[in-house]
Structure formats: C-alpha cells, structure tokens
Image (cartoon, rainbow, N blue to C red):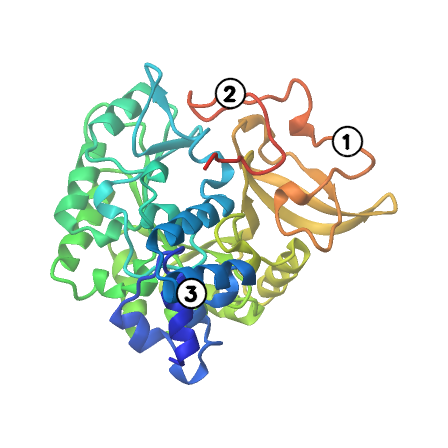
Amino acid sequence: MAPEQQEAVQVLSHVLPFRTNQYVLDQLIDWSNIPDDPIYRLVFPHRDMLPAHEYWQLRDLLLVKQDEAAAQQLVRQIRLRMNPHPAGQMTHNVPRVNDAPLKGLQHKYKETVLFFPSAGQTCHAYCTFCFRWPQFVGMDDMKFDARETGELVAYLKAHRDVTDVLITGGDPLIMNTRSLEEIIAPLLGAGLEHIQNIRIGTKSVSYWPQRFVSDRDADDLLRLFERVVAAGKNMAVMGHYNHAVELRQVVAQQAVKRIVGTGATLRMQGPLIRHINEDPASWAELWRTGVRLGAIPYYMFVERDTGPREYFQLPLARAHEVFQQAYQMVSGLARTVRGPSMSAFPGKVVIDGVAQIGGEKVFALQFLQARNADWVRKPFYAKYDPAATWFDQLRPAFGREKFFFEEEGQGMPEAGHGPQVTALPRRVIPLVA
C-alpha cells in the first residue's frame, strides 16, 4: 500500500472499525487494482469517508500533536454525527418487560425477534459500510449483546405471534459450534412450537467460507443445521454477499453446497454501494451463481443512513435502475430477489418503479414489512427526486402533505412494547453527545 493509503487507514480506523483476514487479503482483493478494487474498498477505510476538514483535524491531533484526549473527543463527535442507531434500533426496537429493556434483543416487526449473542459481536472482517459499526468500536452505550438465552426463551414463550428468531451480530458464526448450539438448542424445546424459522445472519459465507468446509468444527456446524431441520423448523442462513467475486472462489461455492445439503436454506442479500457494486452485471452473476448452487436471491438493500454514508450512497433513482437492469439479466429462478429496499424507521420500503401518473413523475413504493402490519403491500407514491438517497428525503406525490402512514389514525404501537410506536419522525433520531 502507498504511504498515503496506510496513513488513511491509521487515521480512519480511530473512527470506523477496521479488521480483515488472510482469506480476504489473498483470495478476494486484486492488489494490482488498488485502491479501486471493490473488496479493497469494502474492507479498507479511505480518506474520503470523512469530510476533508474532519480528516485533517483528526490527522493533526493523532500524528502531529499526538493529543490522544482531544482526538478521542473529536472521534466521539464524528461518530455521533454519523447517526449510530438508524431506524430507531435503540429507541423503538428494544422490547421491554416490566418496564425494563431486554438486553441483546430487538423486536421491530411482529413476527421476528432479533437476538445478539455477546460472543458473536465481531466479524471475520469488517465492511466499511456496516450499519452496525457502533457494535465494534467501543461505544458500549450503543451495544446490543446478550450473555445467555434465558430472557430470549421467556420472551418468546410470552409472544406466541413470533415465528422467526434471527441470530445476528456482528456475526454469530465467529462463534464455535458448541456456543452456537447453546443458543439454538433451547429454541427447539417444548413451549416454542410457534417458532418456525431460525435464521443466522452471517458474512462468513463470503469472508470465511472455511467455516462450513474445513474449520475444526465445520462438520459439527452442519450437523447442528440438520438437527434444526429434523426438529421440523426451517434453518435459514442469511448470507451477506456484496460482490460477485465473493462467490467465484471454489471454497465459497463448496460452502454453499454444504449448507443447502443439510436441508437448510441459504438466502443471499446485501446493499447496493457506490464504489463497490454499481455494475448490474455483477449482481446478475452473483444471483445466477447462487441459484445454480442452490441459494435463493433475497434482497438488494439501499445503503443505510449511517456511518460514512456520503461515500457509499447512491440516488434512489440510480439504485432502481441498477436493480432493474440486473433483474432483466436473470431467469425467473433468480427473480425471488426484492429491491431496492430501504430498512427505514417505519419499515422495509421497496421502490417498485418509476412512473408517470396524472402527468406527474413518481416513485411507486410499498412496505414489504412494517411496524404496523396493516401497511404491508399497500402501494403509495412519492414525488420523483433524482437526488434523493434515502426514504426521509422523499415527499408525497399528487399534492399530498403526508404519506398515508403519517396521517392521523395511522399510528403505531408504543416504543419498547413490541414492534409499535406513537409518532413518526421524518428525520434521523438525534443522540445527545
């Protein structure tokens, strides 16, 4: 790496998490093409991820003045500016019992509970765009982590409308199989027959596929998947892929075949990111390869409004264009994929298309999932805005002042009491430094 690239990593890694591994370095990055290689940009911090004035101020404090206290104060200010808890994940998604928050759980949508095991709060390598970056940088007041599963099981037994448990992080597959089994086994027991789907969110399928092939307990992991399937439940591996190169490697393809060979499902999802995967052909290759191996294309997300979003974000109009072009390149078996989808405060909003209606150019939108289940699959329209990059920048079409879900009588359940809230802010939820 050139000295200026090394310096940028040194400075930026004080703000954003940086970690990589030998597989990413040796197999996924084309070192003849840095800094433009997509996986290099995916993993290594870049100077342009901060505004120039912040970068030079932080560089001066760290490398010239060597004022650690002042540098840490500036780092804290930058992190809080970066909207570290998008979509109300701390204020509105954490369930409460007897008016006390359940640590390490989130419950935004009625059917699905998220569980964050403390042993899974890291990853094999960190993505520079990751919306859960506060989990990795020592912001303990922003962490979701649970030490054991007792509260999870008790909560699930009391909420029989929950059908899905998503074990997430970080990356739960950084854990050994024995530790993971301690979480999953109780979910197969009596009183939890209503839990139909056990999901694991993981990037290991692309950053460390050896987890399923050659790790010491890889076979034990696959036997655990088989145990879930034998118990009559769906074992769903939610595989995070960001570029076609991640599935070109022989070991990565072996991992997919071994996962689906257990009877588990592997669903492919990831965000559309500027500098990384703007090429529709890369998405089409990824989905086609996945289908050939037995995986299911699931989501193309819009990059969330957090972290160095100005570096990664694309206009929604461009996101729809990339998705549409990629979609046109694949057969019906790969058209299970949905997108571009925004995991916004009120729910998962998908851009269905761009249309002319009554002489007005609009985005056609709908909720694929929502805090209020009545909103799901109900179409609505926003004024076409070629510069908008996130949901809160859109405005209602046809002269309306509010979207239907913002109008009186369309409220949501209250914060901390299951997946519902009282009021819907239009902008990000601020944090006090």
Dot 3 surroundings within 10 Å: few (below 14), some, or many (20 or more)?
A: many
Q: Residue at x 19, y 25 (%)?
A: 190
Q: Secondary structure at mark 3?
A: loop
The quarter of the image holding the C terminus is top left
Q: Disc 3 marks which residue?
A: 45
In this view, the residue in front, 387 or 83, is: 83
Q: Is residue 364 left or right of residue 55?
A: right
Q: Disc 2 marks which residue?
A: 413
Q: Nearer the viewer, mark 3 or mark 2?
A: 3
Give the Cα distance between marks 2 and 1.
23 Å
Q: Indicate which disc, 3 or 2, sits on the residue closer to the N terminus.
A: 3
Q: Residue at x 38, y 69 (%)?
A: 247
Give the Cα distance between marks 3 and 2.
39 Å
Q: Secondary structure at mark 1?
A: loop
Residue 353: % across, % down = 69, 51
Q: Is residue 43 above or below residue 305?
A: below
Q: Residue furthest bottom?
A: 32
Q: Residue at x 42, y 65 (%)?
A: 45
Q: Which mark is residue 401?
A: 1
Q: Quadrant of residue 386?
A: bottom right
Q: Secondary structure at mark 2?
A: loop
